[in-house]
Image: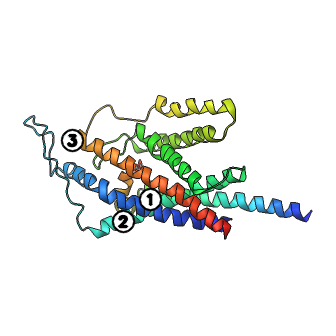
Amino acid sequence: MTKNLLTSAVLAGVAAGLIAALLQFTFVISHLMEGELYETGERIHFATDGSTQSDRIQPSIGTDFARHGMTLAFNMITYTGYGLILLALMVFANGKGHGITPRIGLIWGVAGFVAVQLAPGIGQPPGLPGTIGSEVGPRQAWWAMTIIVTAIALALIAFSKRWTALLSVPLLLAPHLIGAPYLDTYFGVAPPELSARFAALSFGTALAGWSSLGFLCAWFWTKADAA
Amino acid sequence: MTTNAATIERSDSSAMGLAIAMLAGVFLLMASGIAQATVLHDAAHDQRHAMAFPCH
């Protein structure tokens, strides 16, 4: 079982990481690199003359294959990491009588997106390079706590019988009522539209990556289990 | 008796398997998302931003 679990999660993670990276190259990275032009001061949006207009021109992602190769490799590592945890939880649920099929895997993947990207992203949205944040320790603690609490809430919705599912409501709300750590000053140098677009594109590609991950974890697992 | 022993052994090893998979997953995520070492941070930079890791 352990061998099937590890093999399936790694295969699914590498494939989902490839899908996510290709989507990032198509949609996200050009916006990220446009943000870097404001981070470095090559472009200035809030100019001293009071003008807040600047040209909307995304740089080409170019031919820095070392940089983009690393983005591909680290997406594969990240999705393999998430895949190992996701499939371990699916197999645990399977032991309690909840079946694993690729379709159910897809739902697990979407739930993973909600717990790991969307819920913490509400308090700490994906940020362009150069975004100034509060101290990293408390932000990491809030991020990890939000993921765990949201995952427990989703598990209650999915698996609990009758009214105990309602306990998910306070759990889903708690991290946001507590609130993510933030600074009491805005520091952004990039156009707000660019930051918003970057965050939305990051969420979109992560949803595609996570859906693929859940589907593929279940698909490889059912293949390996049948063999 | 034999059946019981086999069952117990299998559930033990599957719990161990789940724990190994979870730990391996957390280890990979620490490397790809959280670790502060400059080389790792720079190489993973774009991916960390796209996946919204709180890394700095």
Whether A31 is drawn above or below A3: the answer is above
On whether disc 1 and disc 3 are found on a single subunit, the reply is no
- Marks 2 and 3, how far apart in space? 27 Å
- Marks 2 and 1, how far apart in space? 10 Å
- Going from the N terminus, do you reach mark 2 or mark 3 first? 2
| Furthest residue in direction left, as rendered | A49
* Rendered location of residue A103, percent (x, y): 56, 53
Judging depth in this view, the residue of A218 and B36 nearest the camera is: A218
* Rendered location of residue B36, percent (x, y): 41, 56
Q: Is residue A139 left or right of residue B9?
A: left
Residue A54's quadrant in the figure? top left
One can see residue B32 in this view: yes
Q: Chain of mark 2?
A: A
Q: Amino acid at mark 3?
A: Pro
Residue A102's quadrant in the figure? bottom right
Q: Dot 3 corresponds to which residue?
A: A191
Q: Dot 1 corresponds to which residue?
A: B32
Q: Dot 2 corresponds to which residue?
A: A70
- Picture disc at residue A33: none
* Rendered location of residue B5, percent (x, y): 86, 62
Q: Is residue A177 left or right of residue A51?
A: right
